[in-house]
Image (spheres, rainbow, N blue to C red):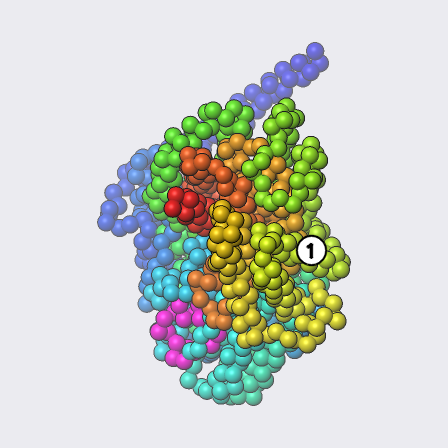
């Protein structure tokens, strides 16, 4: 009752306030809005030929002209870039309606192919350039702690920080953290496309060129400067014909730690003596290669840091001694960082936190003395964090050229003190603000950036980012007239703060809006996959409709997976879905076997004949064995985002227990050799061939580990201490071993013919192919992942003892393919792609063998299960094989539709680049390589062989 009384009193008080306080205020505001709208309606219609997206530099009132005149009297122009109020309102008021303020605006960013130029009425000499030349040194994957931490090898660079000659930053490199898009960000100041992840790999690609875009390199070239470049040939792909002197090296031959950098360093001394260049660019790759092959904790890493630091020392010494280098700014930076595994491409803090330093003896006059080394403020965050795109406008201001048109960067304010005049500082920030304002007007044509009757909403919270940017610009416009008079220098700090505030907000707005999509192509991809799903549906439905619970489980898994793709957290942790799906499926199989105990042992679905003695035990407790071994498998490699840094077997236990590791590795190779023995047990020569090839494969793996991960070996191992295999001999030995592995197949066929003649029966060696493939996959896997194959064999043997229907075996194959992909350390992040075995036996970079080896080393688990399932289905009839193909094709098409639909529907999502786009690429890889190549083509060839 008391609560009811209080509610009634509250209602009466609110009604009284509305009537006596808020009501008159609202009425007055309504009258003002009505009068203003009538005034606007009475104005003549603006010229329709002038676009609201056009930048109108003409001033619209005499007061702003007066401001420009006052500033010009100091011979230092502060031109205000204002579009016509009428033109800005033409679009927004065309319909005669008041638009809703909180409606999300559509943005469209079109990159301009022309060069930015100073405006005709700008006084170019108003802000003299601070430097004449730039030395731009990129150390690939230079994570911030590699330079700033206590364990860094950049000792000379740290001394420059302490002396004030180097200004250090942590540069935020947005995803995707691979070289090509990061170079685009650093040279254009814009946000690159995720398509550059693919173009970054294609050596022959020319569509990613920046030859016709505005960059700080083309600005220097347009002013008569000469450019030279040595290092990663990605620069040559981006800027063809731009460099006077160049020497490119491929960035994908990650086995090369030294020559790839020596090829750059050998050019440094002579270029430092030349006076004909305006930009000297170097891009070192060795540190990145070490990360890919051995990780950031590799013993090679510190030595490489010392080497790079010596290059910095040589350059800085020349800048002090050589007269023509005294007005040179030296930029040392990383294009991206790396994660704990040494890879990159994703959005983890280690990958997005490269170091960035601006170095010059001139900076010592700024008095910016900093402590070095230091501890991070938080993970990999040292000193102040800036955007990587800020490099472009900062170089533009320091070298005295216009900011490139497509830049979203902000001039780094630490360098403003290079100019003593406050007016010059404001001029630099104002030019940067005008450039970003142009970009925002083009991206958001429906928004008016002139102060009008709606500017009063700036005091209302909350505001959208675009509205915060508008309000920040209104504050700048209010301060500009007040600060333009003589003796108003005390207002410059406030104006400088307002400009920086606007720049930061505008940068955030433009960075979030820099997503261009071709919706037509997205829908075309959806339609194509729907067509494939429709083609496979009749055959799949025929099998699913008669399969009872198995069919229902299959349909439920597809529906669950499709819904999961619309949640970013579930996409990042997809391994959990397949782990739980595998557990549920094993539970179903256990219930089925318990209900039909006499049908649980199959005489035809088996991989080998070694374990018939244990068949009754495995049949009864097979499901328990599957679940227990799967629990071990789940902890082998912690993947995803949430638990990626947690201790696991592969990275925590086995490296510290080397005896256990190499005992399991030797057991895996020995068991594979025994399986090869079993198929030709009557031939001693066959056994000798199998033993020699397996032993050679084990020695090769030891050589790989000694080269890339020596910490996994004991010091007494001859291959480690003596360096028996290295460089060319290792490549030759690898090719011999790989050739020996695949030669087992024709050799077995030769022995098979003789055995058929002696025994009078046919026995096609399909299991020999599977065992040879297993030996190849083992050799292509990380040493710490090799024991997983023992668990996979246990799973396959248990499944071979179960009498599974065609659909049940198909579902089992699909689930374990995805489950083992994540068990081997895979994820939906680009950074989880393992390149450590991508160059086994490759002497020079070639995209075809490297691409094949990369796929094999990352999909070794799914490939093994495709082959194992083919052996399990060796006795299936033709119509059963066709049903198998239809079901896996239908599953692939439907899951791919869900991924494409999620990416299309969520194309403006905050995590579109960091989560959904990488998942899209992985889905394409699953479709093209694993399904179309391994599953589909392999099955077609097997069908043809069976029919032949």
Q: Position of residue 886 (x, y in %)?
A: 42, 36
Q: Is residue 233 visible?
A: yes
Q: Is residue 239 magenta?
A: yes
Q: Residue 305: x percent and y percent?
A: 63, 73
Q: Give the image location of residue 269, x and y in percent.
A: 52, 86
Q: What residue is rendered at 42% in x and 44% in y? A: 946
Q: Identify which residue, 495 or 148, lies in the foreground.
A: 148
Which element type, helix, strand or loop, lies under badge 1?
helix
Question: In the rendered image, which quarter is residue 414 located in?
Answer: bottom right
Q: In this figure, what is the number of numbered marks?
A: 1
Specify the quadrant of the image occupied by residue 256. bottom right
Q: Nearer the viewer, residue 158 or 456?
A: 158
407 is higher (above) or lower (below) than 168: above
At 53% from the left edge and 72% from the top edge, which residue is drawn?
Answer: 732
Taking the image as shown, residue 316 lies to the left or right of residue 456, namely: right
Residue bearing the label numbered 1: 667
In the rendered image, the quadrant that contains the N terminus is top right
Magenta range is 226-245
Q: Residue at x 67, y 14 (%)?
A: 5
Could you say which is closer to the camera, residue 750 or residue 269? 750
Q: Is residue 765 above or below residue 805?
A: below
**509 inside magenta stretch:** no
């Amino acid at each position: 009752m008391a609560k009811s009384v209080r509610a009634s009193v509250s209602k009466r008080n609110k009604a009284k306030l509305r009537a006596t306080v808020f009501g008159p205020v609202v009425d007055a505001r309504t009258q003002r809005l009505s009068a203003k709208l009538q005034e606007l309606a009475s104005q003549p219609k603006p010229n329709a030929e002038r676009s609201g997206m056009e930048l109108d530099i003409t001033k619209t009132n005499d007061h702003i002209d007066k401001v420009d005149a006052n500033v010009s009297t100091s011979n230092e122009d502060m031109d205000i870039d204002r579009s016509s109020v009428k033109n800005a309102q033409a679009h927004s008021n065309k319909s005669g309606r008041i638009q809703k303020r909180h409606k999300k605006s559509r943005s469209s960013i079109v990159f301009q192919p022309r060069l930015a130029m100073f405006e005709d009425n700008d006084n170019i000499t108003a802000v003299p350039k601070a430097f004449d030349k730039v030395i731009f040194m990129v150390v690939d994957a230079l994570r911030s702690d590699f330079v700033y931490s206590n364990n860094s090898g950049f000792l000379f660079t740290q001394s420059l920080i302490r002396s004030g000659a180097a200004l250090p930053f942590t540069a935020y490199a947005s995803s995707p953290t691979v070289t090509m898009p990061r170079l685009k960000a650093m040279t254009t100041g814009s946000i690159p496309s995720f398509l550059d992840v693919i173009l970054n790999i294609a050596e022959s690609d020319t569509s990613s060129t920046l030859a016709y875009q505005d960059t700080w390199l083309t600005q220097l070239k347009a002013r008569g400067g000469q450019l030279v470049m040595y290092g990663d040939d990605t620069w040559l792909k981006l800027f063809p014909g731009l460099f006077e002197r160049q020497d490119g090296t491929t960035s994908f031959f990650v086995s090369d730690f030294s020559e790839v950098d020596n090829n750059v360093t050998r050019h440094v001394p002579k270029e430092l003596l030349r006076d004909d260049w305006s930009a000297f660019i170097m891009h070192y790759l060795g540190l990145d290669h070490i990360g890919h092959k051995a990780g950031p904790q590799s013993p090679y890493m510190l030595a490489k840091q010392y080497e790079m630091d010596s290059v910095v020392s040589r350059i800085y010494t020349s800048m002090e001694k050589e007269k023509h280098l005294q007005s040179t700014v030296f930029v040392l930076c990383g294009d991206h960082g790396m994660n704990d595994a040494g890879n990159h491409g994703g959005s983890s803090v280690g990958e997005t936190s490269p170091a960035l330093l601006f170095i010059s003896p001139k900076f010592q006059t700024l008095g910016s003395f900093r402590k070095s080394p230091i501890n991070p403020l938080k993970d990999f965050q040292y000193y102040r964090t800036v955007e990587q795109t800020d490099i472009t406008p900062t170089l533009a201001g320091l070298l005295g050229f216009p900011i490139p048109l497509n830049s979203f960067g902000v001039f780094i304010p630490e360098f403003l003190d290079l100019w003593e005049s406050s007016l010059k500082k404001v001029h630099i920030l104002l030019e940067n603000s005008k450039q970003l304002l142009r970009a925002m007007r083009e991206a958001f044509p429906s928004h008016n950036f002139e102060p009008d009757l709606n500017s009063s909403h700036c005091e209302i919270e909350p505001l959208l980012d675009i509205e915060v940017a508008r309000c920040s610009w209104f504050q700048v416009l209010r301060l500009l007239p007040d600060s333009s008079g003589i003796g108003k220098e005390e207002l410059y700090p406030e104006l400088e703060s307002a400009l920086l505030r606007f720049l930061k907000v505008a940068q955030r707005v433009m960075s979030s809006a820099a997503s261009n999509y071709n919706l037509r192509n997205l829908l075309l991809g959806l339609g194509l996959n729907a067509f494939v799903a429709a083609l496979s549906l009749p055959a799949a439905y025929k099998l699913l409709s008669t399969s009872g619970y198995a069919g229902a489980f299959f349909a439920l898994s597809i529906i669950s997976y499709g819904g999961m793709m619309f949640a970013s957290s579930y996409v990042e942790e997809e391994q959990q879905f397949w782990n739980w799906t595998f557990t549920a499926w094993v539970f179903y199989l256990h219930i089925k076997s318990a209900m039909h105990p006499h049908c649980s042992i199959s005489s035809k679905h088996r991989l080998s004949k070694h374990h018939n003695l244990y068949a009754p035990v495995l049949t009864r407790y097979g499901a328990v064995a599957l679940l227990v071994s799967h629990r071990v498998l789940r902890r082998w490699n912690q993947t995803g985002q949430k638990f990626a840094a947690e201790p696991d077997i592969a990275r925590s236990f086995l490296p510290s227990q080397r005896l256990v590791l190499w005992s399991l590795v030797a057991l895996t190779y020995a068991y594979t050799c025994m399986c090869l023995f079993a198929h030709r047990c009557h031939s001693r020569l066959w056994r000798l061939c199998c033993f020699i090839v397996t032993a050679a494969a084990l020695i090769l793996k030891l050589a790989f580990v000694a080269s890339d991960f020596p910490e996994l070996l004991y010091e007494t191992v001859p291959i480690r201490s003596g360096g028996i295999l290295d460089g060319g001999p290792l490549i030759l030995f690898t090719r011999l071993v790989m050739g020996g592995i695949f030669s087992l197949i024709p050799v077995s066929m030769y022995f098979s013919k003789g055995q058929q003649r002696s025994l009078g029966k046919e026995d096609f060696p399909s299991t020999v192919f599977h065992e040879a493939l297993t030996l190849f996959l083992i050799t292509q896997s990380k040493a710490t992942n090799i024991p997983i194959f023992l668990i996979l064999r246990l799973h396959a043997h248990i499944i071979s003892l179960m009498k599974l229907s065609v659909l049940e075996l198909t579902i089992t194959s699909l689930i374990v393919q995805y489950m083992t992909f994540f068990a081997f350390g895979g994820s939906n992040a680009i950074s989880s792609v393992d390149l450590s075995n991508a160059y086994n036996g490759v002497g020079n970079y070639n995209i075809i063998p490297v691409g094949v080896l990369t796929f094999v080393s990352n999909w070794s688990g799914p490939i093994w299960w495709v082959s194992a399932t083919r052996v399990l289905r060796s006795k299936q009839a033709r119509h059963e094989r066709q049903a198998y193909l239809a079901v896996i094709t239908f599953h692939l098409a439907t899951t791919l539709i869900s991924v494409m639909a999620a990416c299309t529907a969520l194309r403006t999502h905050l995590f579109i680049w960091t989560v959904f786009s990488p998942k899209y690429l992985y889905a394409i890889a699953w479709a093209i390589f694993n399904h179309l190549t391994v599953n589909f083509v392999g099955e077609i060839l097997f069908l043809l062989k069976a029919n032949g």
